Image (tube, rainbow, N blue to C red):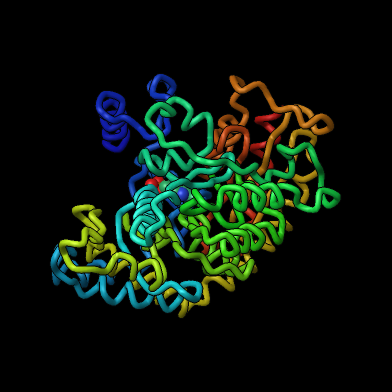
Amino acid sequence: MSGEAARHERLVALDKRHLWHPFTQMLGWLEDEPLIIERGEGPYLFDTLGRRYLDGVSSLWVNVHGHRKPELDAAVRAQLDRVAHSTLLGLGSVPAIELAARLVAVAPPGLSRVFYSDSGSTAVEIAVKIAFQHWKQRGRPEKCRFLALGEAYHGDTLGSVSVGGMELFHGIFKPLLFDVLRAPPPYCYRCPLGKSRPSCEIACAAEAERIVAAHANELAAVVVEPIVQGAAGMITQPPGYLRRLREACRQNDVLFIADEVAVGFGRTGSLFACTQEGVEPDLLCLAKGLTGGYLPLAATLTTEAVFESFLGPWESDRTFFHGHTYTGNPLACAAALANLDLLERERTVERAAEAGKRLAEALEPLAAHPHVGEIRQRGLMVGIELVADRGSRAPFPRAERRGHRAILEARKRGVILRPLGDVVVLMPPLCLDGAQLDELAHVTRAAIEVATA
Ligand SMILES: *Cc1c(COP(=O)(O)O)cnc(C)c1O
């Protein structure tokens, strides 16, 4: 056995003995041959045996400019020469201050305050807690409930799981969660109201408006993933849906929380998704792409009006008692600043919008495949829903794991993907060139053909 192969075998053995992988049935993992990543370069990842793969899901929806981007590497190194970490509890830090100002400058209008944390889950958790405490401080303590969408995904901490609505992920934890009002998801392919477009006139939006109005006196906020409900299987909202939901909140004095953890930073073809609907949220949750996919950092942005309700003398108990030890970590903030520089200098978002069109064209032949029910896409976020039967839209039996099979086939052909059930997800870094986009589409097509045969 070569030195490389022996090392690989040793790592596989140690992984199987000690690691517990997220969102992974470990029994299956222990039986499978794992792929172990050694390094990256641009949109490619290389494994411990030297094989190259296109990173088709941006290392789980985070990478923006590719791996080992020189400007991002340099920014982190330069910050390392100053300080790796200092706290925001009682102290300021240079990159955290600079980044807060930059985020406010690029965010939708009205947002002026930045609260840092380390993951998308905490960004949502914080938004929920801020909204709850805000109404107490406004003398409206009865406004303490939340409305979220069916099939929503907002993270894995208990608060973010409470607003989440995916039975598979969240069902077991129900006894630990707070009760949330639920609006039907705008899942047109499998409409929960049994309607079809355009004759439905977006009845799910009318239903959401009705719930907001009916519960206005007890609602603190509505939480929503704008434009695309990612983890639900890339459910794309009909145009006008988000604007109507936002307007209902404004009319009923309910805060609007936009969870742009997945859709932010150019994925859907604009820097932030809610601007496509002219929506200005009261709270905006950011994470994943914030550091270009380099380091764990999240931010919850809010308005001056919300911020002001937290001001008072120390003994007024208006302090927001929340913070994580690594909140606003300087290395992560330095990466985020370099990410924003690159987005601007390289016009990454405009180019990604073009790339989205190219990918849509390259995927077009797949639309007629007998086991492809629907291809949903906004910008560079794509979900391809596999079905047993196109006519009846009947899914494959869950145990057949067709989505999983498809990604194993893609892997054999040099592309890393990760499915959501039987939805094959493509969410490449924004930097892919035309040939790489075509490669992604061609491999996806071949993989789906084999996996559904
Ligand atoms: C991934 C995701 C989260 C959770 O982010 P983590 O960093 O994994 O905690 C929250 N909301 C949305 C919409 C996401 O896609």
- Between 102 and 285, the one nearer to me in the picture: 285
Residue at 33 percent across and 46 percent down: it is: 38
For the image, the number of numbered tags is 0
Spot occupied by residue 231 in the image (x, y as percentages of width and height): 53, 43
Residue 162's quadrant in the figure? top left
Does 399 sit above or below residue 270?
above
Does 27 sit above or below residue 53?
above
Does 441 sit above or below residue 304?
above
Residue at 41 percent across and 70 percent down: it is: 303
Quarter of the image containing the C terminus?
Answer: top right
- Between 119 and 113, the one nearer to me in the picture: 113
Spot occupied by residue 86 in the image (x, y as percentages of width and height): 14, 64
Residue 306 visible: yes
Quarter of the image containing the N terminus?
Answer: top left
- In the rendered structure, the answer to whether residue 420 lies left or right of residue 42 reads right
Spot occupied by residue 39 in the image (x, y as percentages of width and height): 35, 51
Residue at 43 percent across and 58 percent down: it is: 285
Q: Residue furthest front?
A: 139
Residue 60 visible: no
Residue 451's quadrant in the figure? top right
- In the rendered structure, the answer to whether residue 192 lies left or right of residue 402 reads right
Residue at 28 percent across and 69 percent down: it is: 334
Spot occupied by residue 359 in the image (x, y as percentages of width and height): 66, 58
